[in-house]
Image (tube, rainbow, N blue to C red):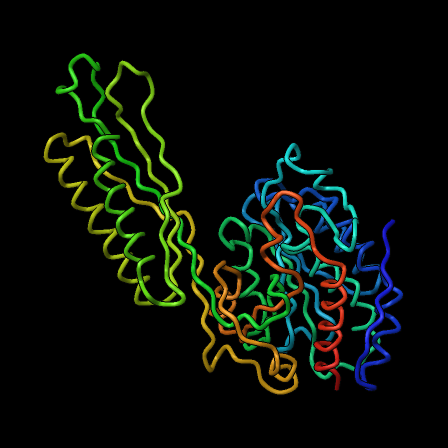
Amino acid sequence: MLAIICVVRMSSNALALVMTFETTSCLAILDRLVGFDTTSHKSNSDLIFWVRDYLDSLGVTSTLLPDITGNKFNLLATIGDASVPGIVLSGHTDVVPADGSNWSSDPFNLRQDEGRIYGRGTTDMKGFLSIVLAAVPAMLEQPLGFPITLAFSYDEEVGCFGAQSLAHAMPTGQHVIVGEPTTLHRGTRHKGARVQTLAVTGVPAHSGTPSLGLSAIEYSQTILTQLIKLGHDLSDNRNSFPSSLVVTGISGGGAVNIVPANCELTWLFRAANAGDAQNVEQKVFEMSRLLDEQLKAVAPQAGVSLATVCDVPLFQSDASSLMSGRVGEVFATRPAINLNFATEAGVYHSAGHSVVVCGPGDMAQGHIHNEYIQVAALQDGIKFINEVIDAARS
């Protein structure tokens, strides 16, 4: 079992917190969390049940919110009065895929080397979850002025689906801290993430007589060209925080001697502002409508189908998303940054909560082979969570 002793310097009114926090091993918990393969296409139930049992052993009751399949779960657990707003420590339990052949060690077996902790999810974002869980005994020992809620979600990596039910399962007006890796800077803005597909249906025919059919691949080229240009136009924007659009997939056809009747394009649009979001939405709809009319004019059975796979809202701090009081003071001196990746912050903000994105580690070490988090980053995260607990004291 791995263990870490964290020595921190804090104000006198928070010293009592440190004693309990030091006796709980953040790395021992991280070891358990990483050991659960919670890649998004798999169930996260084993991890969630372990967290539930761990909290239960400390006298904290959890509420599990299953997805429609019953195989994935959100977890809510509140220390204090759950009926009133307080602090929410939010994190997702799923991870991106890990190809073990490209790792120097088993991605689901924690490894420590020269101040780095390797394993899938160590940075994104089981490191934060382990710190929060290790801090629960300290939370329980304090006279809290308002509650602290743990909100652990499923399927963040594929569309922030779990957070949608979590956001509405809590009283509005919560102070939600989304613990994504920001090197503990204050993330006040991030892009949205809209994944869309366009399926083109043509007419099959023998490739020896292509005029009798309609090639779905050929007609898809029109949309593909327009999408690529739209992405380039967004990238050419001189804005320091531009929106982006990237075509990420194309598939179609079958046998080489058949005019292809099907082709599908997939793209990811990241809107940095509401204006770009509306403009791109209108352009995509119009180009799809025109191609659909063009195909149907030749063959009524042909056409276009546009679908949105997921649509994570962008997040931008405003008066309703800024934290106030002692909680706000925790973030007052932390530099504000923009984030190029989407998080659950937009979901929580849209549901009426004040939100900030702030967590240990650097996203540059996430989503890569040999993902790792620095031991020093975990130590800094411990200090940060102690500050948050102190802000909740009565």
Q: Is residue 216 left or right of residue 307?
A: left
Which is nearer the eye, 179 or 142? Answer: 179
Where residue 66 appears, as percent x and y from the top left, is 60, 51
Which is nearer the eye, 57 or 387? Answer: 387
Where residue 261 appears, as percent x and y from the top left, is 26, 26
Which is nearer the eye, 241 or 52? Answer: 241
Indicate whether 323 appears above or below 45: below
Where residue 242 appears, as percent x and y from the top left, is 37, 63
User: From the image, which quarter does the C terminus lie in?
Assistant: bottom right
Which is nearer the eye, 388 or 227? Answer: 227
Q: Residue at x 88, y 73 (%)?
A: 19
The quarter of the picture where residue 290 lies is top left
Indicate whether 249 appears above or below 286: above
Q: Residue at x 79, y 52 (%)?
A: 114
Total labels drawn: 0
Q: Is residue 28 left or right of residue 66?
A: right
Q: Is residue 102 left or right of residue 49?
A: left
Residue found at the very far front of the displayed protein? 114
Q: Residue at x 45, y 58 (%)?
A: 312
Indicate whether 374 appears above or below 219: below
Where residue 266 appears, as percent x and y from the top left, is 37, 42
